[in-house]
Image (cartoon, rainbow, N blue to C red):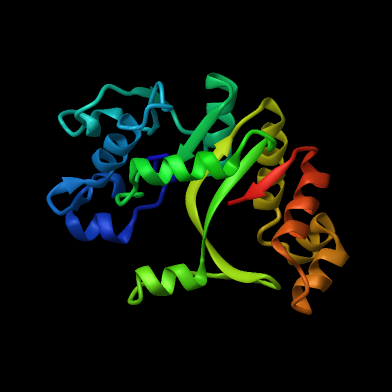
Amino acid sequence: LAGTRAGTSDPMARAAGVSHKAILPVAGRPMIARVVDALAAHPRVGRIVVSIERPEILDGVLDHPVGILPPAPGPSASVMEALSTLGTPLLVTTADHALLRPEWIDAFLASAGTQCDMAAAIAMAGDIARDAPSGRRTLIRLADGAFSGCNLFLFRTPAALGVVRLWQRIERQRKHPLRMARLLGPMVLLRYATGRLTRAALCARIGVLSHATVRLV
């Protein structure tokens, strides 16, 4: 995912004088080039497709061939478009995932296994504090530990479309907390508020709402 929302611009991109955050350099190399390098180096990754509204900005940036998919309004709609066009299994990441490594992809796919429809990579708070002590991340705090998302997702089977549809429903209600609460269910919110919601319970609830099996790994 490398697109920019219509009518918005990233402050880091503005400061660097570039149109997209994806082409900001990290140690002299554009972030998206680093992401594509990591994907291309993994033996289980086949075709690489970039969702971006201005593909010409990639001219001369990448060392590997990629397909282009026009983005939809917002990340969930862009993922839905990718699934509809490319099918499953589909590995999704963001163009600013500049530190992505092939071995991380390998570990993620191995942990996801073959029994789920969709998996999302997470990093536990303790691991973040150990490996990036100066970093600041937004954490989701559950009963069995706090974690942050890693912007790496596996949509393994067609049933994963249900997860994206749920994601879109939640996005539509993000400015209406009461509607979002009704969507997720009062028991989930109560368990979260009282510190009793676990990762397994959260995945189970998402599974009920999306008719898919979901894992956080």
Farthest residue in the bottom direction?
Answer: 194
Farthest residue in the left direction?
Answer: 28
**Which residue corresponds to the image point at 33% horizontal and 45% vertical from the top-left?**
101
Left or right? Give the position of 97 relative to 201.
Answer: left
**Res 74 seen here:** no
Q: How many marks?
A: 0
Snapshot quadrant of residue 83: top right
Residue 170 in percent (x, y) is at 69, 52
Q: Is residue 52 above or below residue 100?
A: above
Snapshot quadrant of residue 77: top right
Residue 37 in percent (x, y) is at 26, 36
Left or right? Give the position of 90 relative to 6.
Answer: right
Please state, as top left, top right, bottom left or bottom right, where the N terminus lies in the image: top left
**Res 99 seen here:** yes
Residue 144 in percent (x, y) is at 68, 70
Left or right? Give the position of 121 relative to 62.
Answer: right
Snapshot quadrant of residue 161: top right
Left or right? Give the position of 118 relative to 92.
Answer: right
Q: Nearer the viewer, residue 181 or 38?
A: 38
**Which residue corresponds to the image point at 21% horizontal and 61% vertical from the top-left?**
15
Residue 7 in percent (x, y) is at 41, 48
Q: Is residue 57 above or below residue 95?
A: above
